[in-house]
Amino acid sequence: MTNKLPTNLQDRYEVRDGFIIKKGETDPAIFAAMESIKRSMAAETARRERIRQGIEPAGGQWGVWNISDRD
């Protein structure tokens, strides 16, 4: 991932931890939201890796789908 913004956005926005935010933003709620999003993204990535390694089942229906309307 690159932290470089297009030239037309560089005067108003900046990249922090992979998130594009308004320059000079100091609202704690925004940073709390960013941390929450980062935690959930890390959890999703870890779950996908466990599924790929066969440690955790994928869940849902992953087998034969009987879609016939003539049951």
Image (spheres, rainbow, N blue to C red):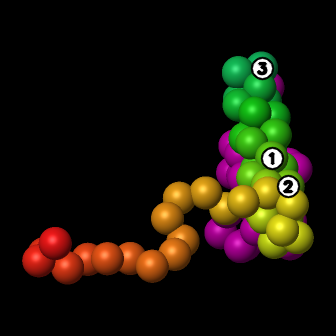
Separation of disc 1 and disc 3 at Cα?
Answer: 23 Å
Q: Earlier in the sequence, mark 2 or mark 3?
A: 3
Crowding at label 2, few (<14), some or many (≥20) Cα neighbours within 10 Å?
few
In the image, is residue 3 above or below residue 16?
Answer: below
Q: Which residue carries the number 2 mark? A: 46
Q: Residue furthest left?
A: 70
- Residue 28 tag number: 3
- The residue range painted magenta reads 1-26
- Name the residue located 85 percent from the left edge and 55 percent from the top edge: 46
In the image, is residue 35 above or below residue 49?
Answer: above
Q: Secondary structure at mark 3?
A: helix
Separation of disc 2 and disc 3 at Cα?
Answer: 27 Å
Q: Residue 22 is drawn in which quadrant?
A: top right
| In the image: residue 21, left or right of residue 35 | left
Q: Earlier in the sequence, mark 1 or mark 3?
A: 3
Measuring from the top left, give residue 25's x and y in whole percent: 75, 32
Q: Which residue carries the number 1 mark? A: 43
- Residue 34 tag number: none
Q: Secondary structure at mark 1?
A: helix
In the image, is residue 6 above or below residue 49?
Answer: below
Measuring from the top left, give residue 34's x and y in whole percent: 75, 37
Q: Which residue type carries mark 1?
A: Ala
Q: Which residue type carries mark 2?
A: Ala
